[in-house]
Amino acid sequence: MIVHCCHCRWCQRETGTAFALNALIEADRVALTQGEVEAVATPSLSGKGQKISRCPKCRIALWSNYAGAGDAVRFIRIGTLDEPDRFPPDIHIFTSSKQPWVVLPAGVPAVPEYYKSSEVWSKPSLERRAVLRSQRGRSP
Ligand SMILES: [Zn+2]
């Protein structure tokens, strides 16, 4: 639905680098083509925690589920995809803690912290979110 480039301190610490790159996608659109994942309960910025799904062998994080959206939306780590180049950021978030050497490209939205989905997401993505909300009976 959207690709976040998150510059928050938590993502910097979790990744050990300057930002995290996550694609938000409905869980039922994700197919695990081999193996399995292990969900590891991990603290998050909100304080509500997240579940990081990791490969049980190499321990690489494939996706996270956050308390806000629950299990319905996965935050897929772009760098783990076979074709990561296909998913550049749609928006840069938490740029208030962006590392100073990271230069953001012109023309890509950037916000100091978070944003309202209704103001940033494409119409098709908002429609997909509406489907999720109607399935869950609460906001993802
Ligand atoms: Zn973050």
Image: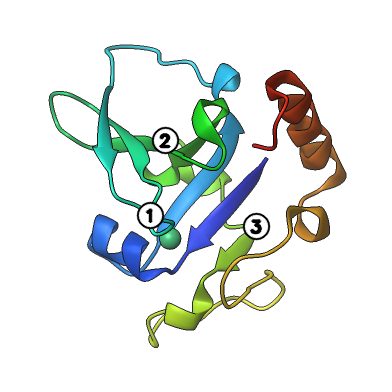
Q: Kindly identify the amino acid type of the residue bearing the numbered disc 1.
A: Gly
Q: Residues within 10 Å of mark 1 (few under 14, many from 20)?
A: few
Q: What residue type is labelled 2?
A: Leu
Q: Which of marks 1 and 3 is nearer the N terminus?
A: 1
| Count of labels in the image | 3
Mark 2 lies on residue: 81
Which quadrant of the render holds ligand 1? bottom left
Q: In this view, does 134 lie above or below 92?
A: above
Give coordinates of residue 75: x percent, y percent: 48, 40
Q: Say which residue label 3 marks.
A: 90
Is residue 104 rendered to the left or right of residue 16? right
Q: Nearer the viewer, mark 1 or mark 3?
A: 1
The alpha-carbon separation of the residues under discs 3 and 2 comes to: 17 Å
Among numbered discs 3 and 2, the one appearing first in the sequence? 2
- Secondary structure at badge 1 equals loop
For label 1, the residue is 47
Q: x, y (%) of residue 95? A: 51, 77
Query: Residue 24 in the image: x percent, y percent?
Result: 57, 40
| Residue 97 vertical placement versus 79 (above, below) | below
The N terminus: image quadrant: top right
Graded by Cα atoms within 10 Å as few (under 14), some (14 to 19) or many (20 or more), the crowding at tag 3 reads: some
Within 8 Å of ligand 1, the CB of disc 2?
no
Q: Residue 103 carries which label?
A: none
Residue at the (40%, 38%) spot, across then down: 64
Task: Tell me the element at label 3.
Answer: loop
Q: What residue type is labelled 3?
A: Asp
37 in relation to 115, above or below: above
Say whether residue 83 is left or right of residue 40. Answer: right
- SS at mark 2? loop
Q: Which of marks 2 and 1 is in front?
A: 1
